[in-house]
Image: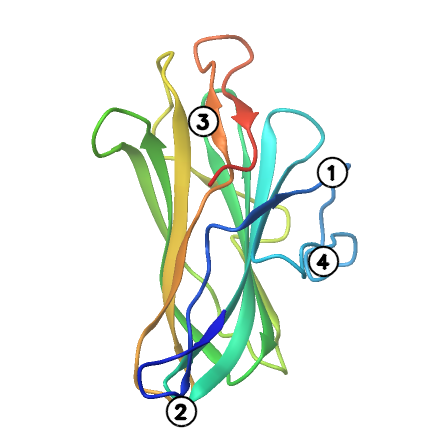
Amino acid sequence: MTTAGANGKPTTTIVADDFQQTASVADRVGIAADDYDSWCESGSVCGRTVGGNYIAEVKGNAAYGNAAGVIGAFDFIVRQAFEGTRPRWRNTLIWDYGPQMQPQEFTNNCRTNVTGPDGYCGQNPFYFAYVSSGSWRSDKPSTTGYYYNSQLTAGSGKYHDDNYGSFFASGYSQLFYAPTIHTGRWNQCTVSPGCRYYQVPWA
């Protein structure tokens, strides 16, 4: 979102709380088959379930810049797919335009919903490859694999995930941030076959 700054010049912020619901879709894997570069290009953040209540995806469309204006834009996509009570994540970064993006640490966090600051039930850092016009997409750990949470999720409470990261843009010294996005809220982790989503998306 671009607005006028105090000095009258445009400033750009990344908007991460403007959700729109999209229809569920059949499961897709692989760069040739998925729709990540075309899905949710008109909204800032979208969420959807994939083939049932055990897989959910969120996509954030982000522009970034400084006091001089917009520098570039990218997509950050997270798929979370349960294996029983174990959260798993697949992550995709897509370059839309601008200079080469040089990702720093990104993180998938499992969180417990409690009164007060939410607790952690697993922290999972990872690193995207550089993306640019010549190599516009990075999938971690792969187009079909997942990062596994280090511990099982247990209990009858409610949970969610926090997914975020930071990056440099070639030719600029400042560190930019991809704000937190969430695949959804889940619970019923004590019920077979395990955790499932009850709210996708959520703000």
Q: Which mark is residue 86?
A: 3
- Residue with the most extreme left position: 116
Amino acid type for the residue under numbered disc 4: Ile
Mark 3 or 2, which is nearer the eye?
Answer: 2
Badge 4: how crowded within 10 Å, few (<14), some, or many (20+)?
Answer: few
Q: Name the residue under label 2.
A: 171
3D distance between C-alphas at marks 1 and 3: 25 Å
Q: In this view, does 83 lie to the left or right of 173?
A: right
Residue 14 on image: x %, y % = 44, 65
**Residue drawn at the location 40% of the way across and 91% of the way down:** 171
**Residue drawn at the location 72% of the way across and 30% of the way down:** 51
Amino acid type for the residue under numbered disc 2: Gly
Element carrying mark 1: loop
Amino acid type for the residue under numbered disc 3: Arg
3D distance between C-alphas at marks 2 and 1: 39 Å
Q: Mark 4 points at which residue?
A: 31
